[in-house]
Image: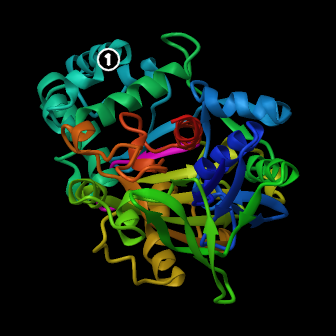
Amino acid sequence: MRVGIIGGGVGGLGAAYDLLKSGHEVELYERAPFLGGLASTFDVGGGQLERFYHHLFTSDTTIIELLQELGLDDRLIWEDSKVGWFADGKIYPFSTPFDLLKFSRVSIFDRIRMGLVTLYLQRYKNWKNLENITAAEWMRKWAGKRNWEMIWEPLMMGKFTVYREQIAMPWLWSKFVTRSSSRQHLLGKEKLGYIRGSWGTLVDELQQRITNMNGILKPNTLVTQIVSQENRITGLKIRNADGEEKLRPFDVVISTVPTFLLPNLIDLPKEYADQCTSVEYEGAIAVIWVLKKPLSNIYWLNVADRDIPFLLALEQTNLVPPSEYGGKHIVYTANYVPKDDYRWPLDESDIVADYIPHLKKINPSFEESWIEKTYLHKEAAAQPIMTTNYSQKMPSVKTPINGLWTAAMSQVYPMDRGTNYSIQLGIDVARRAVKE
């Protein structure tokens, strides 16, 4: 079969690679001048760094097995995670169950209660029974008001802002399941993985394998229309960077871009089109700081101080050695934000100036002279908003148009957005598409 893929993120690349192995003809189109999507990289200090932070959990079996197949498993590194919680002007360690028991922002009773809730959710299997309740309602009821206010509400506020009271409990359940599966035992530390040389190593190898199998990759190329006849896909209209337009024939088309874009490319039955456009997204804004000195000894620092304008300070060089980046220390300050957030029109210098005083709160010794360089990356559709009974609202991967399929980030539900699940969905949908 001739298969056209819209979107050159890891989901699209994974689908293309898998289809070519099975003997299909594949062409992939990506509007950006690079491939890899949110996992794409750029040069920092002589090494490659992701535009948005990435790591692996031990449960990310699709990527781990793919790396093994590609002969890249020797690039995998695993380290004990170093998680912290910033509140009240101090960093609380938050890597192990023992750290929870020492978390003095809540009473010993609430700490034990939160520990029991954590154990329960880690072992709970039937997430569908949680679909009709929000995470806020569930946690207030079972973890208690104080745990909600001190632990979960600040995180939900930082992650989902205006949507924080609407997020369905399966989303939060998936976080407990993912994080617990990366612990070797109940009381042990979580293990996090990374691909030495960056995720660009995986993206580059997939590109090479796809090309070697005569697959066609077209970055900097916009799909302007999905063409159909008598309710069956016939091809794609594309426009390259020079403005040249072509019609390419296909038997199957797989779209890996956000579903709200699909009705702009093809006429769909109203019910399905409404499902596609009803999925809301938050955007992501990440400032990358190249520093002469470390900000802290924590890799993943949750920020629970509402006066600080970012949710997370992730110090890449507390997972990967600074030698990967010319001896520099790399920090991401990251946010998920709604469409009307004040930062969208701001440029890099304005956001950096806004953030600097808050880095000093995390480390009072921090000085502007530590900053060698900063980078700003923005993505408008980074986090799907998964509300109650989301599985009933989510568009199916098989559209009403014969031969047209979708494998979007918003369809990995109940799991949260993540590279592993994007690749897994891309491969699964590709196999179904050529089979059915």
Q: Is residue 328 visible?
A: no
**Residue drawn at (53%, 62%) of the image:** 234
Disc 1: CA contacts within 10 A as few (<14), some (14-19) or many (>=20) = some
Q: Which residues are magenta?
A: 299-308
**Residue drawn at (52%, 56%) of the image:** 363
**Residue drawn at (28%, 34%) of the image:** 105
Percent coordinates x, y for residue 237 in the rendering: 56, 74
Q: Residue furthest bottom?
A: 243
Q: Nearer the viewer, residue 338 or 317?
A: 338
Model colouring: rainbow
Q: Amino acid at mark 1?
A: Gly
Q: Is residue 423 above or below residue 51?
A: above
For mark 1, what is the residue? 115
Q: Is residue 228 above or below residue 384?
A: below
Q: Nearer the viewer, residue 26 or 424?
A: 26
Judged left or right of residue 340, residue 308 is: right
Give the image quarter of residue 428. top right
Percent coordinates x, y for residue 111 in the rendering: 28, 21
Percent coordinates x, y for residue 95 in the rendering: 50, 28
| Residue 304: in magenta span | yes
Percent coordinates x, y for residue 213 in the rendering: 84, 48
Q: Is residue 292 visible?
A: yes
**Residue drawn at (36%, 34%) of the image:** 414
Per the picture, the main secondary structure of the magenta-coloured stretch is loop
Judged left or right of residue 53, residue 274 is: left
Total numbered badges shown on the rendered structure: 1
User: Mark 1 falls on what kind of element?
Assistant: helix
